[in-house]
Amino acid sequence: MEHYAKHGFGLLAVEDRMTGEFLGNVGPMMQRVDDVDEIELGWSIMPSRARQGIASEAASACRDWVFESVRVDHQISLIRPENEPSRGVARNLGMTIWKQTIFGSMHWLHDVWRLSSEGHRVGTTAK
């Protein structure tokens, strides 16, 4: 709630349309990366429902909302190099690896995936 109050956006719950079952969360968050405030698009779907396109669908809607409503020139996703499912979502969103950084309380290496608003068409998913 603090993040919403401060920035006007944050993580959203993802639910199954038919059952209302909680599936995870997806959405934009402010993150400090290499001393720069960035809008990070993040996603986390329950393992039992992973690899069904849920993260890509929800993240695509959030990505489009950020570009339409927040009007930033780019957004990022922080993904551990070994996290192939999340790498696949980032590719589906049209993101590419921009750089690597050490991030988080565990000081782990992360790939910083990036998507520019330039050339991005709202409502599209890269293939």
Image (cartoon, rainbow, N blue to C red):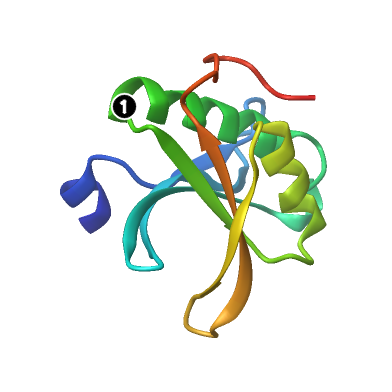
Q: Nearer the viewer, residue 29 or 112?
A: 112
* Pointer 1 local density, CA inside 10 Å: few below 14, some 14–19, many at least 20: few
Q: Is residue 22 above or below residue 117?
A: below
Q: Residue at horizontal 68%, vertical 34%?
A: 56
In the rendered image, residue 98, in percent from the top left (x then y), is placed at 59, 51
- In the rendered image of this protein, does residue 66 appear above or below residue 24? above
In the depicted view, which residue is nearer to us: 98 or 126? 98
Q: For this view, does 86 lie left or right of residue 108?
A: right
Q: Nearer the viewer, residue 15 or 76?
A: 76
> Which picture quadrant has residue 107?
bottom right
Is residue 100 positioned above or below 9 on the image? Answer: below
Residue pointed to by mark 1:
71
Residue that appears at 72% across and 33% down: 92
Q: Quadrant of residue 67?
A: top left
Residue 69 found in image quarter: top left
Which residue lies at the image location 37% right of the left edge and 20% below the top edge? 68
What's the residue type where badge 1 is placed? Answer: Arg
Give the structural element (helix, strand or loop) at label 1.
loop
Quadrant showing the C terminus = top right
